[in-house]
Image (cartoon, grey):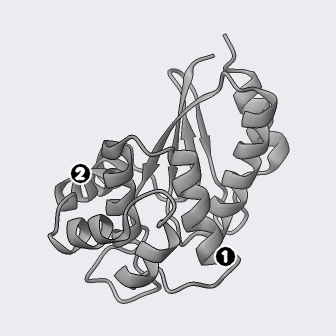
Amino acid sequence: MKNTDFYFDYICPFCYQSFIELSEYKLLHPELTIEFHPFEIHPRPESFGKHTDLCIRGMFLAKELGVDLWAYNTAIFNARFQQRADIENIDVLSDIVKDLIDPQVFRNTIRSGQYQNNLDNANQTAYHTLKIMVVPHYITENEVLESIEGIGISKEALFQFLDSNTH
């Protein structure tokens, strides 16, 4: 199965739904390889909506530490959409991921500004290189599955896209 790139923002309800469906597909196809590419729909200093820069920088830390990114992304998405947690608060975030990353390491690393360049590069790639304007967004070697603004991606369309990329 080819690698599939998943572009998303933790604040996006369509991304959350797509992540749930992607997780269902992964249970049926454990050989599925997903590269997670979070980026900010509303980067600072934009004042519209919540900011996810801390969550995204936290994912880069998790990746460097070898943390299971499925578990990290599940924790962040669930905190945002099920628990309505304040994902802009570093103390709340460090508590959300405490079973995956030492909370003090998480707080210190994120407060230090580490991974800001990774975040800037992720935003640059999504917006300027790939011209992604709506999320969620999936890319394989030869195919792209784009969201429809205000609708997202149906489970059927996602599964069909992933099935077509099995060889």
Q: Earlier in the sequence, mark 2 or mark 1?
A: 1
Choose top left, top right, bottom left or bottom right for residue 52.
bottom left
Q: Which residue is mark 1?
A: 81
Judge the density around disc 1: few (<14), some (14-19), many (≥20) Cα neighbours within 10 Å. Answer: some
Residue 138: give x, y in percent of width and height: 57, 40
Judge by depth and name the residue closer to the eye, 106 or 81.
106
| Rendered image: mark on residue 108 | none
Instruction: Indicate the position of residue 86 as horizontal and vertical percent values.
Output: 50, 86
Amino acid type assigned to the residue bearing label 2 in the image = Asn
The C terminus lies in quadrant:
top right
| Residue at (16, 68) in percent of width and height | 113
Question: Label 2 crowding class (10 Å Cα cut-off): few <14, some 14-19, many 20+?
Answer: few
Kind of element beneath mark 1: helix
Kindly indicate the quadrant of the structure image that contains residue 50: bottom left
Whole-percent x, y for residue 15 in the image? 62, 60
Q: Which residue is mark 2?
A: 121
